[in-house]
């Protein structure tokens, strides 16, 4: 599985800079009114020129003013930024089997392609199309999961493109500060630093037991993420585009029958949910993750002429067909099924 994470550069400020050419190249701060240094409220964002003066998102606007009173201070015009966002997101959607927009300027894509080279080509196409249509730049990260994709999109901002191959993940992460991992906030990070833990490489020296002792249920996630492992799926949240279930086995499984039975049980749960939501779909996707975290998806769509939607029986037969090529060779860590392609 290849995940792409895209994040627009200095988003609100970039839209302002584009729409007000007279400010081009000048430091621009979008946020509360600075009122000659007495303003309350905060900076929403600043362009990269303004960041040279230390101005950052969420900083009090009065500090920003003091850092550079000559900067261009502009109010937030959310409607305009939202309209730009609504035009950008469909540019990404066509390359994704699943897409999850996580904020006004940021989205994860599960790509249709299976090689890093093809993923990189897609990223370049997306960047080019956004530039040609909107005159805005973005930064893109590509990796085997959400964690790595997100960290890599931030790696070479602005206008960046970073591809992290599966075998480079650990090396890529090791020098990053540990608080780049979701779940390690400022408090947690200061507890870790008290133990001499600064980087992800340092974090890997702590045993899982110790992390669970320190952080409770989050401990296990932190342990995994420090090793570049992240099983969160890309899920469209705004409108239901697919219904899926997955299971990670307690121990890695090689026996095909057990894997097929598990997929079958998951499919029954999916069909229960589909019935509850009043949905019926035509596309079935199976997901197989091997013990080394290499992940494959395979899907098939019913032709309209055959039947309007998959029945549970058909879906089970199709699951077997899609799963078989992956089974019996290597131990399987996770299996999942997903139904999509709902009628409008
Ligand atoms: P970000 O993607 O975090 O920031 P950015 O796009 O401005 O800059 P970068 O190049 O580092 O990605 O947030 C997207 C937009 O969300 C940002 O343009 C303004 C808004 N925002 C706030 O209003 N307050 C905040 O504290 C943050 C972080 C963002
Ligand atoms: Mg951004």
Image: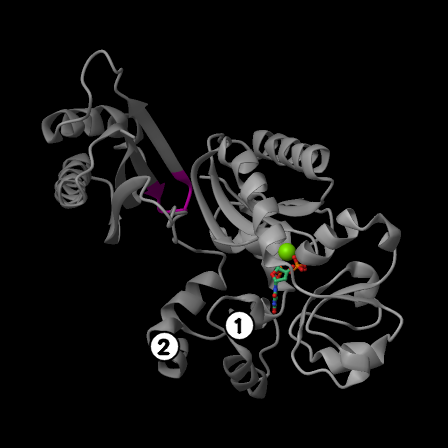
Confirm whether the magenta stretch covers residue 290: yes
Residue 43 left/right relative to 48: left
> Residue visible at 54% across and 46% down?
143
Mark 1 is surrounded, within 10 Å at the Cα level, by few (under 14), some (14 to 19) or many (20 or more) other residues, namely: many
332 is higher (above) or lower (below) than 226: above
Mark 2 is surrounded, within 10 Å at the Cα level, by few (under 14), some (14 to 19) or many (20 or more) other residues, namely: some
The quarter of the picture where residue 329 lies is top left
- Compare residues 119 and 107 and report the one nearer the observer: 107
Tell me the number on the disc at residue 203: 1
The residue sitting at the left extreme is 313
Query: What's the magenta region?
Result: 289-295
Residue 311 in view in this figure:
yes
11 is higher (above) or lower (below) than 46: above
**Of callouts 2 and 1, the N-terminal one:** 1
> Residue visible at 58% across and 78% down?
197
The N terminus sits in image quarter: top left
Residue 157 left/right relative to 71: left
Relative image position of residue 296 (x, y in whole percent): 38, 35
The C terminus sits in image quarter: top left
Which residue is the site of mark 2?
A: 212
Relative image position of residue 51 (x, y in whole percent): 79, 66
Relative image position of residue 264 (x, y in whole percent): 14, 38
The residue sitting at the top extreme is 305
């Amino acid at each position: 599985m290849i995940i792409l994470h895209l994040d627009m550069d200095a988003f609100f400020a970039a839209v302002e800079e584009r729409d007000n050419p007279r400010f081009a190249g000048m430091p621009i701060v979008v946020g509360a009114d600075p009122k000659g240094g007495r303003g309350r409220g905060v900076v929403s964002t600043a362009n990269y020129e303004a960041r040279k003066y230390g101005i950052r998102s969420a900083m009090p606007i009065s500090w920003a003013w003091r850092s550079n009173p000559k900067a261009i201070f502009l109010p937030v015009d959310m409607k305009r930024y939202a309209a730009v966002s609504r035009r950008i997101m469909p540019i990404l959607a066509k390359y994704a089997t699943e897409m999850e927009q996580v904020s006004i300027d940021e989205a994860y894509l599960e790509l249709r392609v299976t090689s890093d080279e093809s993923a990189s080509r897609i990223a370049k196409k997306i960047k080019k199309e956004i530039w040609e249509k909107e005159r805005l730049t973005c930064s893109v990260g590509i990796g085997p999961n959400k964690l790595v994709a997100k960290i890599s999109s931030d790696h070479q901002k602005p206008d960046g493109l970073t591809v992290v191959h599966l075998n480079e993940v650990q090396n890529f992460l090791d020098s990053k500060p540990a608080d780049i991992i979701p779940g390690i906030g400022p408090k947690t990070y200061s507890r870790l630093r008290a133990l001499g833990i600064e980087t992800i490489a340092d974090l890997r020296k702590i045993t899982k037991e110790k992390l669970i002792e320190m952080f409770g249920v989050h401990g296990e996630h932190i342990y995994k993420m420090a090793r570049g492992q992240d099983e969160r799926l890309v899920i469209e949240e705004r409108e239901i585009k697919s219904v899926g279930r997955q299971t990670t086995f307690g121990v890695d499984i090689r026996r095909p029958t057990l894997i097929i039975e598990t997929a079958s049980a998951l499919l029954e749960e999916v069909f229960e949910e589909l019935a509850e939501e009043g949905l019926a779909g035509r596309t079935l996707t199976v997901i197989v993750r091997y013990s080394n975290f290499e992940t494959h998806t395979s899907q098939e769509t019913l032709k309209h002429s055959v039947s309007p939607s998959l029945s549970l029986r058909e879906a089970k037969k199709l699951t077997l067909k899609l799963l078989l090529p992956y089974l019996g060779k290597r131990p399987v860590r996770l299996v999942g099924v997903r139904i999509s392609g709902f009628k409008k």
